[in-house]
């Protein structure tokens, strides 16, 4: 329920109890996922020393995600969102629990297939988390606070991306992968509890349910009819899919920068440090004018930072470049989230958010598989340099093909 200071003046997001509870849900799910992701990446690379095996982690997660995500959006639009999200959190906790069982059982310790199955389970349950968050976000905040709320939500999101990898690396270095997996499991359970206790009014279910596939098609038609939304999603997807470097960090840390799991955990979180700085700035000074142009320049900066990171041989310089990489990505995250909230009707938030999640997972998990494959074909550094160059081409193509996005002013969407 939206809290107010008077009958007409809503509380700012940081004083809105429902919003704070939703942020607690978001950060605990992120910590659960990030600790498990860092730990399993390090675990598998130690067993195989293969960048391709790292890339397979992304493929193992994204394939089940793609299959389930459209149906997850439909369910979020038709079932109680809070309860559905809490059940998904328990599923999220099951992934590190299974990985812990693999790690502690001598006969299963090197069983990559079972580890990939656990990662696949993670892909299934994660397909619900984003749509649930976006649907509940619109219920706890009034429309005029969406820009500021999206910026604060991005701060929380990026804080999870900083703390999660750092904790994962520290726990792995201090207590081993079993300790890290157990901490991740506990955080998943806490996330489920936090969502069960969220006080929010949910819209009544539709009086008449459409057939599942017809409802999914309706969501797809809506997204593809919105050039600004589709352009922002596609720009983010292709830039990170083809130009990201984070999935190859275990290989860079071990083989090029010659550091250990603690350094890996810190380096994995540095892009989020940059994103937090940007999101805090945008929370105080919401970006509205020339938003499209700023987005294009930010993604171009993302590509340039990727190229420079691949060429660096100094740990400190690489860390600074990852912060810059995160700052550029942070602009894209805030603007894409704001566009999604402003353009989407409430009754379609689950389906549209699922489509957005597919774009995001395409860029992250499928991008990890692409990076691993390219590293196997070209070598680690040439693959990442090539990806950064392709990102610059993606920006130029988007600016040409999506003029409404290039000229976007967020005031026109209110």
Image: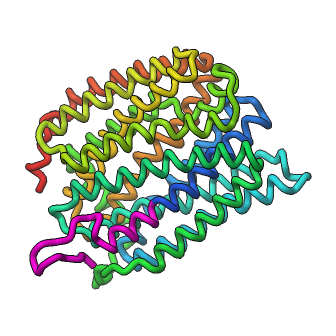
The quarter of the rendered structure image containing the N terminus is bottom left
The magenta span reads 1-26
- Horizontal side of 104 relative to 136 (left or right) equals right
Rendering coords of residue 82 (x, y %):
43, 76
Q: Residue at left 22%, top 59%?
A: 146
Q: In the rendered image, is residue 208 in sight? A: no
Rendering coords of residue 380 (x, y %):
60, 20
Outermost residue on the right side: it is 107
Q: How is the protein colored in the picture?
A: rainbow
Q: Residue at left 61%, top 23%?
A: 375
Residue 74, quarter of picture: bottom left
- Horizontal side of 141 relative to 36 (left or right) equals left
Q: Residue at left 60%, top 16%?
A: 378
Q: Residue at left 40%, top 79%?
A: 80
The quarter of the rendered structure image containing the C terminus is bottom left
In the displayed structure, 285 sits above or below 305; it is below
Asked whether 284 or 97 is in front, the reply is 284
In the displayed structure, 195 sits above or below 24; it is below
Rendering coords of residue 235 (x, y %):
32, 36
Inspect the magenta stretch and tell me whether residue 166 lies in it.
no
Q: In the rendered image, is residue 10 in sight? A: yes
In the displayed structure, 363 sits above or below 11; it is above
């Amino acid at each position: 329920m939206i809290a107010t200071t008077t009958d007409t003046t809503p509380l700012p997001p940081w004083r809105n109890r429902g919003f704070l509870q939703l942020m607690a849900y978001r950060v605990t799910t992120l910590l659960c996922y990030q600790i498990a992701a860092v730990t399993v990446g390090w675990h598998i690379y130690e067993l195989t020393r293969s960048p391709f095996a790292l890339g397979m982690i992304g493929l193992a997660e994204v394939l089940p995600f793609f299959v389930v995500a459209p149906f997850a959006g439909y369910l979020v639009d038709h079932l109680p969102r809070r309860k559905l999200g809490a059940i998904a959190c328990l599923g999220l906790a099951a992934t590190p629990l299974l990985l812990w069982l693999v790690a502690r059982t001598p006969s299963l310790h090197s069983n990559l297939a079972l580890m990939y199955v656990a990662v696949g389970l993670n892909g299934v349950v994660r397909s619900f988390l984003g749509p649930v968050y976006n649907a509940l976000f619109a219920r706890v905040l009034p429309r005029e606070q969406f820009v500021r709320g999206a910026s604060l939500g991005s701060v929380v999101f990026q804080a999870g991306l900083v703390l999660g990898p750092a904790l994962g690396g520290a726990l792995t270095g201090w207590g081993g992968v079993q300790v890290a997996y157990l901490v991740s499991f506990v955080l998943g359970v806490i996330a489920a509890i936090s969502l069960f206790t969220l006080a929010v009014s949910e819209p009544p279910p539709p009086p008449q349910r459409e057939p599942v596939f017809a409802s999914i098609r309706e969501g797809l038609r809506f997204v593809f009819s919105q050039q600004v939304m589709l352009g922002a999603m596609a720009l983010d997807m292709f830039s990170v899919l083809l130009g990201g470097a984070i999935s190859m960090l275990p290989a860079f840390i071990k083989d090029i920068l010659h550091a250990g799991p603690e350094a890996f955990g810190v380096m994995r979180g540095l892009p989020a440090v940059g994103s937090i700085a940007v999101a805090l700035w945008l929370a105080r000074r919401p970006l509205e004018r020339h938003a499209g142009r700023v987005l294009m320049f930010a993604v171009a900066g993302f590509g340039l930072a990727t190229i420079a990171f691949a060429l660096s041989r100094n740990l400190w310089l690489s860390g600074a470049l990852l912060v810059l990489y995160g700052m550029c990505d942070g602009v894209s995250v805030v603007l894409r989230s704001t566009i999604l909230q402003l353009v989407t009707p409430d009754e379609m938030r689950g389906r549209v958010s699922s489509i957005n999640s597919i774009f995001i997972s395409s860029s992250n998990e499928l991008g990890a598989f692409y990076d691993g494959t390219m590293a196997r074909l070209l070598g680690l550094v040439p693959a990442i340099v090539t990806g950064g160059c392709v990102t610059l081409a993606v920006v130029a193509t988007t600016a040409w093909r999506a003029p409404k996005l290039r000229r976007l002013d967020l005031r026109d969407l209110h």
